[in-house]
Image: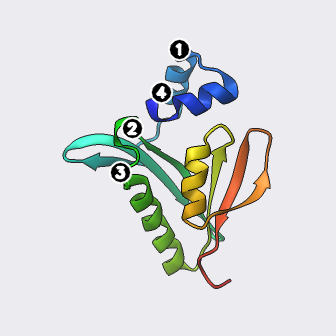
């Protein structure tokens, strides 16, 4: 939760009890993969494959491990899956998370839709 707290708090506010209950109710280990570095759990990623796209539903890296290229490597792996499958990769990023948005832009994602609290971004690294 620490990886996303600042953006969530800036968007909706932070209620620790609600966040814990929401996490417990919505955590599905079958959908998410833990990112491990040197035997330590440092992040989580959730990728959903659909007929017409790959959706990067979640990526969160612990603050102490951000800025080391982990997020880039994970996202590039998802992009490679998209390239091989002939599918674009989409994601949502909160407007209050400009660092993540810059990362996605550096990895050639473009904003395709603006919603109240988030941007919808898409990577079209495949011939469509």
**For the residue carrying disc 4, how many other residues have a C-alpha within 10 Å: few (<14), some (14-19), or many (20+)?**
few
Please say if the residues under marks 1 and 2 sit with CB atoms less than 8 Å apart: no
* Marker disc for residue 68: 3
Depth-wise, is mark 4 or mark 3 nearer the camera?
Answer: 3
**In terms of sequence position, does the residue under pointer 3 or pointer 1 come before the other?**
1
Distance from disc 1 to disc 2, alpha carbons, whole Å, reads 20 Å
Distance Cα–Cα, label 3 vs label 1: 31 Å
| Residue for badge 2 | 62
27 with respect to 126 (left or right): left
In front of the other: 51 or 109: 109
Q: Position of residue 124 (x, y in %)?
A: 64, 73
Mark 1 or 2, which is nearer the eye? 2
- Please state which of the two labelled residues, at mark 3 or mark 1, is closer to the viewer: 3
Would you call the spot at circle 1 few (<14 residues within 10 Å), some (14-19), or many (20 or more)? few
How packed mark 3 is, by other alpha carbons closer than 10 Å (few <14, some 14-19, many 20 or more), is few
Q: Nearer the viewer, mark 2 or mark 3?
A: 3
Dot 2: element = loop
- Of label 4 and label 3, which has the lower sequence position? 4
Can residue 94 be spotted in the picture? yes
* Label placed on residue 17: 1
Q: CA distance from mark 2 to mark 4?
A: 18 Å
Element type at marker 4?
A: helix
Q: CA distance from mark 4 to mark 3?
A: 29 Å
* Placement of 109 over or under 65, stated as above or below: below
Helix, strand or loop for disc 3: loop
Q: Earlier in the sequence, mark 2 or mark 3?
A: 2
């Amino acid at each position: 939760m620490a990886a996303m707290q600042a953006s969530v708090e800036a968007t909706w506010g932070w209620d620790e009890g609600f966040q814990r209950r929401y996490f417990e109710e919505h955590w599905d280990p079958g959908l998410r993969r833990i990112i491990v570095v040197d035997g330590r759990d440092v992040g989580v990623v959730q990728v959903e494959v659909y007929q017409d796209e790959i959706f990067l539903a979640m990526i969160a890296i612990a603050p102490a491990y951000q800025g080391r290229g982990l997020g880039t490597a994970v996202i590039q792996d998802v992009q490679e899956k998209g390239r091989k499958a002939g599918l674009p990769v989409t994601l949502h990023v909160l407007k209050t998370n400009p660092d993540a948005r810059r990362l996605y832009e550096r990895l050639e994602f473009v904003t395709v839709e603006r919603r109240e609290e988030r941007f919808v971004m898409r990577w079209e690294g495949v011939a469509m």
